[in-house]
Image: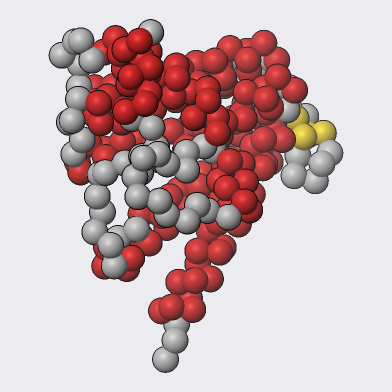
Amino acid sequence: MAAAARVYRETRKKHDQLFNAYVMRPVAAVVVAALARTPATPNQVTVASLFVMVAAAAALIAFPSYRGGLAAVVVLEASYCFDCADGMLARYKKLASKTGHLFDFFTDELKAVLVVSALAVRAWRGGGTGIDARLWPAGDARFLLAGVAGVAIVSSALSLTNFVRRPELSGRETTVEAFYETATAEKPPSPVTMFLRFLNHYPSHIWLWALLGCMDVYFWLYVALNALYLARGWLGLVVRFGRG
């Protein structure tokens, strides 16, 4: 536990999600403290995180019951624990690299698409609340259509993020250095921005929706947040590139 506490202190990130800072990273620090003594690499942990997420998505689809949803979310949070651990291990063992950073983000994109598609198929199998706030029965094809639209929206939002982060647009070269708590102080995001990031950060609260038995409602919320982000991003791009 002393080693885990040291890992946590040395790999903290500035302006991190509250769920990360007080829940997931302390747990991931224990994992990192154990892995630091082995030949395991951060990229291997990233791959493990992706495989565990595939299992979580399969469980969401295979077990559309209330208890099945809880079990699937436990697996999903285990995947996210590994997702936190890979970067922490890289920083702790001084193995951070640009390729590793890009690979981690790439797998995060895959996991986001897995989550939205699995939630849609889950709702199709078990029924749930539709976009019109009415109960749609199991087997309703509208859930599958919403899943296709959701995957398109989330994928487009992720592509937009990759695009606007390009150094040719941002004017800043992509780096792998973490924003540590002890780094040079910079202005934190606004409360509104932090709240929206929290809502879009599914590991922070998807467990709460599972406890409430409202995974179908969360599907609509997650898609809507990504749609708003996509619309805002495209508005900025149109203004920037559409000028004469």
Count of numbered circles in the view: 0
Rendered view: 29 above or below 234: above
Query: Which residue: 18% across, 30% down?
Result: 94
Q: Position of residue 239 (x, y in %)?
A: 49, 78
| Residue 62 visible | no
- In the displayed structure, does residue 173 sit left or right of residue 187? left
Where residue 9 sits, quadrant-wise, is: top left
- In the displayed structure, does residue 27 sit left or right of residue 166? right
Q: Position of residue 131 (x, y in %)?
A: 75, 44
Query: Which residue: 38% across, 23% down?
Result: 8
Query: Which residue: 23% across, 15% down?
Result: 36
Q: Quadrant of the C terminus?
A: bottom left
Q: Residue furthest right?
A: 134
Rendered view: 208 above or below 1: below
Q: Nearer the viewer, residue 122 or 224?
A: 224
- In the displayed structure, does residue 123 sit left or right of residue 100? right
Q: Position of residue 59 (x, y in %)?
A: 53, 16
Q: Nearer the viewer, residue 240 or 136?
A: 240
- In the displayed structure, does residue 92 sit left or right of residue 220? left
Query: Which residue: 61% across, 28% down?
Result: 206
Rendered view: 148 above or below 73: below
Q: Quadrant of the N terminus?
A: top left
Q: Position of residue 209 (x, y in %)?
A: 69, 27
